[in-house]
Image: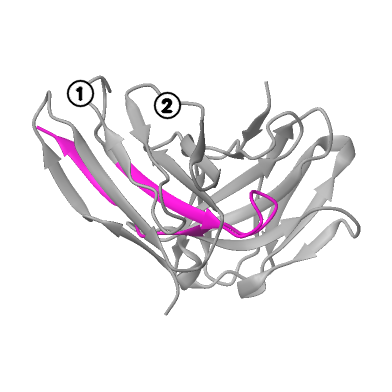
C-alpha cells in the first residue's frame, strides 16, 4: 500500500541549531511530495513541494527539502531554527494509483528551546 | 479576503446524534477535501470532491457522508454510525487537485459526550 512515514514523533532542538525532519514514502513511482506545517489548533500551511527536476527544493520560512530517490526520502531541513518554528510538521505524497488523494505522514512535533 | 471557512469551531454532540460540519470556500477551487486528525495519526482522508456533484470516498469514509451541490460548499455529516467521532476535522481546497497547494480551514473540533 502507498504510505508516508515520519519516523520521529517529537524532536527538540535549541534555538539557532540546525534541523532535519525525516520523511520516507512508499509508492510505485515517484510521487508528488509536500511538506506542510501546522500551528496548534490551526489548519495546515504549505512549506514546499517537489514534482520533478532539481532534487533540492526551497520553501518558505527558510526551509528546504532534498529528494533522494535511492532512499525514498524527502527530508526537511533548516540551517538555524527560530522559536517561532515550533509547530507540527507533516510530510505528504500524492500520485501513483491514488490519483486525487493526498496521503499524510503521522507528523513530527518540533519543540524549540531558547 | 479569499479563504476557507469552517464552522462551527467547536461542537459537542451526544451519542446517537448526527452532526453536520460546514465548509465554505471563496477561492473558486474545483477540488475540496475532508480530513480527520487524531494525535499521532496524522491526517486521514474522509471524502474528496474534484468537481461539483461528484465525490469519492477516502480512506476512512465509514460513518460519514458529504454532498457537493455547489462549488463553494462541501459539508460533512458525521452520522451516528461513526464509532469514534471525537476528533479534529479539517477541510481543504485546491485549484489543481493534489498536485497543487491545498488551502486549509482552521478546523472544527467535535467532541462526543
Q: Secondary structure at mark 1?
A: loop
| Residue B107 in view of the camera | no
Return the residue nearer the eye: B5 or B52. Answer: B52
The chain under label 1 reads B
Q: Is residue A81 above or below residue B103?
A: below
Q: Which residues are magenta?
A: B88-113
> Numbered disc 2: what chain?
B
* Residue holding disc 2: B61
Is residue B100 left or right of B39 when viewed as pictured?
Answer: right
Q: Position of residue A73 (x, y in %)?
A: 77, 41
Identify the residue at horizontal 44%, vertical 64% (top origin): A113
Q: Where is mark 1, residue-wise?
A: B80
Which residue is located at x 65 percent, y 48 percent?
Answer: B98
- Residue B81 x, y percent position in the rendering: 25, 19
Q: Quadrant of the N terminus of chain A?
A: top right
Figure quadrant of residue A17? bottom right
How many marks are shown on the rendered structure?
A: 2
Amino acid at each position: 500500500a502507498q504510505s508516508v512515514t515520519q519516523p520521529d514523533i517529537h524532536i527538540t532542538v535549541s534555538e539557532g541549531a540546525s534541523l532535519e525532519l525525516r520523511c520516507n514514502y512508499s509508492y510505485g513511482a515517484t510521487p508528488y511530495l509536500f511538506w506542510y506545517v501546522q500551528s496548534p489548533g490551526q489548519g495546515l500551511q504549505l512549506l514546499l513541494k517537489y514534482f520533478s527536476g532539481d532534487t533540492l527544493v526551497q520553501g518558505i520560512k527558510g526551509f528546504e527539502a532534498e529528494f533522494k530517490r535511492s532512499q525514498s526520502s524527502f527530508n526537511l531541513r533548516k540551517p538555524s531554527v527560530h522559536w517561532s518554528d515550533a509547530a507540527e510538521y507533516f510530510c505528504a505524497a500524492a500520485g501513483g494509483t491514488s490519483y486525487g488523494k493526498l496521503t499524510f505522514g503521522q507528523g513530527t512535533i518540533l519543540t524549540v528551546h531558547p | 479576503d479569499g479563504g476557507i471557512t469552517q464552522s462551527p469551531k467547536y461542537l459537542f454532540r451526544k451519542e446517537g446524534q448526527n452532526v453536520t460540519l460546514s465548509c465554505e470556500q471563496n477561492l473558486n477551487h474545483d477540488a475540496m477535501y475532508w480530513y480527520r486528525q487524531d494525535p499521532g495519526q496524522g491526517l486521514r482522508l474522509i471524502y474528496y470532491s474534484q468537481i461539483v456533484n461528484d465525490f469519492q470516498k477516502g480512506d476512512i469514509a465509514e460513518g460519514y457522508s458529504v454532498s457537493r451541490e455547489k462549488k463553494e460548499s462541501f459539508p460533512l455529516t458525521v452520522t451516528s454510525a461513526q464509532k469514534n467521532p471525537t476528533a479534529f476535522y479539517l477541510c481543504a481546497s485546491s485549484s489543481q487537485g493534489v498536485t497543487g497547494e491545498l488551502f486549509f480551514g482552521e478546523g472544527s473540533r467535535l467532541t462526543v459526550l
